[in-house]
Amino acid sequence: MSQEDLEPGVINTAMIMKALEEDRPAGEAGRLAVEDRIVLAEVTSLRLEFLNILMIDHLWMMTSLVKLQLGNNIIEKIEGLDLLVNLKELNLSFNNIETIENLGALVQLEVLTLFQNRIRKLENMETLVNLVIFSIGNNKIEDCNDVIYLRRFPHLRSLNMAGNPCVYNSDKDFRQYVCAFLPRLTYYEYRMITAEEQAVAEESYKAVLEKLMECEEKQRHSKEEAEAHAKELTHHSEAFIENLDGDQLFSAMFESDTHGKALLTIGNTAMDIYNKFYEETMNVTWQLFKEGLEQHESRQEEIRQYNNCVTAAKEQNTVASQQYTEKFLQTKAEIFLEIHNMLKVVEKPADTEEGADEGDYVARMKILSDKFNEDCQRTWYDLMTHEFTLYEQLEEINENFKQNMAGLVSTFTKAAQSFFVEIRNLEAGYNEEMSEVANVYLTNLNTATDSVLPELKQVMVNKEALKNATRRSHECHLHAIDNREDQLLKRIRKWIRDYCDEIMIGEIQRCRKKVTEISHFLDIQKEEFEDLQNLLLNAVASLAPSQGASGEMEEISDYQKAVPEPPQEDGEDVVPADRVPSETFTTDIKSTENVAPADSVPSETFTIDTKSTENVVPADCVPFETFTTDIKSIENVAPADCVPSETLTTAIKSTEASETTNESEKIAGSTSNV
């Protein structure tokens, strides 16, 4: 199917998965890639070309993407790339893009290809400071000065602008123009720029370059000043004294004070009072500013000491934890090595035929298990002890830090409040002096014929109007002072509260994470040990039936319940005893097998009714046993008491009827001996 036959579409998950499957490598690498599940967040390269894609979407989950190829589609807008912060190569050639946009987050981008689109202007690329290769050929760029826009990219080494109107419609040598204004460029249209070309180009545009460099120097200087001012303002904001190093507070008093501004037009006397108030207010404000910087430095020093103390405590805890962990892992390695050695011996038929005792392996395994569990418990206790000791220490340190910081904040707020009180007193004196001057002016105005400004005329209607005007001016000034004081106090109190809460919450989360890490680590070690232990016990148990060691099988079962039961012959059941030695009573009657275990009951009777014949088998632990058997072609073997494990087999052989009497006499003799 050709590209023209495809419906215009949007990038979706199905399209992405299909493209990734098609781009899998061949051979063994491809086979391994098929076995691995594709995780979109881990994909580093994606190629979606010739798919008639109209809109970019569904790429937000591919945050690890480094290379993205979207060429030969019908994309009209650059979008949906904001989360691809690791992208280094982007190909959008042969599309219908008209504007360069939405690339602000791609700060690591090194290769950008926009060949054969509809772009008319180079713009919105300021954040692409790492750009090395840029292809913008066969577009609609008309202004040659767009080349100057590219001077902001210090790492740009390769450029292609062929096929644009600014190239073929220009009366100048465009290659020479590019060489002159982009001196760091190495390749233009994929051809290296020689030193001779560079020298000729710079000489040809020398005058223009000098003016341009002078203008750029001014811009750079202005930019540096703006950055320095922004940095300084940030520092002042962290100290909660922003805009107190100048006359911002004083200006805020008169910003909306129309009546106060009108009173200043009374004459020189009013201006003298105003200037005096300005100087006194600026003096107090500057003292407040310096106090804020000093207190900020004190708080920062307290924070540095706190961080050093906490870091040292955490590092000490980490070293101790590593020592305990390494010690545990060393013991674990020794135990695992011994188990592996036993497993090798058990799995060798030659060794087992020489009379190896399975009970020794089980006993040794129990010793190793106890040792491993004890070491696990001790390691867990040591790690938890150190962790909670650290938590308690940090909790105490955090509380002391909170109190110290609260004291420093309280000191600063009290000092700031005293300065604001002083400013209010200055304002009250200013308002009183200005009221006196205004009253004198109003009195003289009644007897004089001087003209009055319209702003002042509204205030000088009568004494009552003047009084209201001075009162409103006073309230306006106090409102500005109160707002700045409230701003300072609220911000610093919120900061100290949030800062200390963040420390407390962070410590709780750190402790919980550490406890979980310790438990998870030891759980994994226990699982590994149990797997190896079960492997050995199963190997030992598989040897028991072939060597007639049913007692060893019972010992294994009593020791490790989780171990699977050893292989059994068809129709055979093994039932372990709980509190008394296990006994197996087997009666083979015409290929029928019954297994009767003795449990924790002092005495049990097992009755097997076979052809109206009753067998009564008492449990062990009885001083004297009576075995009464009505034998009709049946042979019974009575078990001896107090034996850990013994298999009693009665074989029924109809052809041995002649030997029944002799066998009965043997049984009677055995009974009397017991």
Image: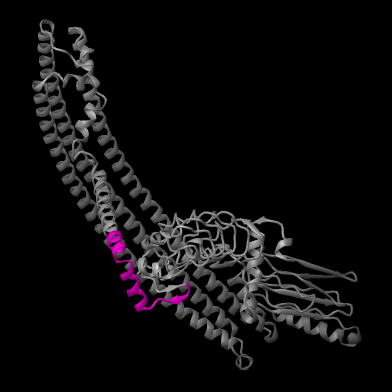
Q: Per the image, is 571 magenta?
A: no
Residue at the far front in the pictured view: 171
Residue found at the far top of this picture: 447
Q: Is 211 part of what is drawn in magenta?
A: yes
Is residue 674 shown left or right of residue 351? right
Residue 132 is at least partly visible in this image: no
Position of residue 420 measured from the top left corner of the image (x, y, whole percent): 17, 31
Residue 600 position, x and y percent, is 65, 64
Image position, residue 96 (x, y; %) = 59, 57
Q: Quadrant of residue 351?
A: bottom right
| Picture residue at 55% right of the left edge, 66% below the top | 43
Residue at 67% across, 75% down: 641
Identify the magenta region.
189-213
Left or right of 285: which side holds 42? right
Picture quarter with the C terminus: bottom right
Q: Is residue 258 above or below residue 233?
A: above
For residue 300, above or below residue 252 = below
